[in-house]
Image: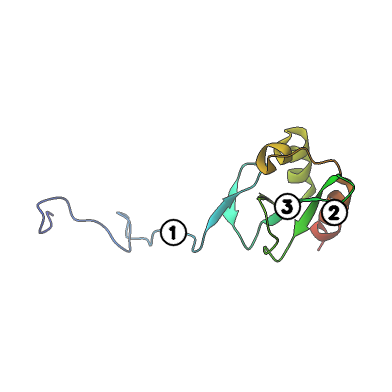
Amino acid sequence: MPDAAGGRARLEETDRTGLRAPAAPSGPLRTCIGCRGTDSRSILLRVVAETHPDGLTVLVPDPRRRAPGRGAWLHPDLRCFDLAVRRRAFARALRCSPGGIDDLRSWVADHAQR
């Protein structure tokens, strides 16, 4: 059935079968640097690179999503963490060469079990 503009009418709340279309996720979507899947900010963990006075750059979890600087998003899951390490995604996403990832790995392991 044509609408007022002469085009085809759009189905707003239902699809052609009469079932409701899946709701679009609300809020901003982010991409996990490990598995490359998209999810909402509330599900993903933000990771930032922090440079210590001795010059060592370490990866730090930012669960409150408030730390300054460039961040990378990661599912709090060891599979995604290991994929990100294998693909060297932390260095690419944070635009630095992070040295310490062991503390972040233990943080992810602790929080993945919850």
Residue density around tag 3, few if under 14, some if 14–19, many if 20 or more, within 10 Å: many
The reply to whether dot 2 and dot 1 touch (C-beta < 8 Å) is no
Of the pair 6 and 67, the residue shown nearer to us: 67
Measured as percent of width and height from the top left, residue 54 is found at 90, 47
The residue where tag 3 is placed is: 48
Please tell me whether residue 93 is drawn above or below residue 43 in the rendered image.
Answer: above
Kind of residue indicated by mark 3: Val
Question: Which residue is pictured at 85% across the width and 41% down the height?
Answer: 99
- In this view, the residue in front, 74 or 18, is 74
Mark 2 and mark 1 lie on one chain; the one further toward the N terminus is 1
Q: 105 and 112: which one is in front?
A: 105
Front in this rendered view, residue 77 or 47? 47
Between marks 3 and 2 in the image, the one whose residue lies nearer the viewer: 3
Nearest to N terminus: mark 3 or mark 1: 1
State the CA–CA distance, disc 3 to disc 2.
17 Å
How many neighbours does mark 2 have within 10 angstroms: few (below 14), some (14-19), or many (20 or more)?
some
| Residue shown at the point (89%, 47%) measured from the top left | 102
In percent of the image, x 10 and y 59: which residue is there? 4
Residue 109 image label:
2
* Cα–Cα gap, marks 2 and 1: 33 Å
Extreme residue in the front direction: 53
Q: Which is more foreground, mark 3 or mark 1?
A: 3
The kind of secondary structure element at disc 3 is strand
Q: What is the number of the mark on residue 22?
A: 1
From what the image shows, is residue 99 above or below residue 13? above
Instruction: Look at the numbered disc 2 and give the secondary structure of its residue.
Output: helix
Name the amino acid, label 1.
Pro
Snapshot quadrant of residue 81: top right
* Left or right: 33 in relation to 82: left
Query: The N terminus lies in which quarter of the figure?
Result: bottom left
Q: Residue 99: which disc? A: none
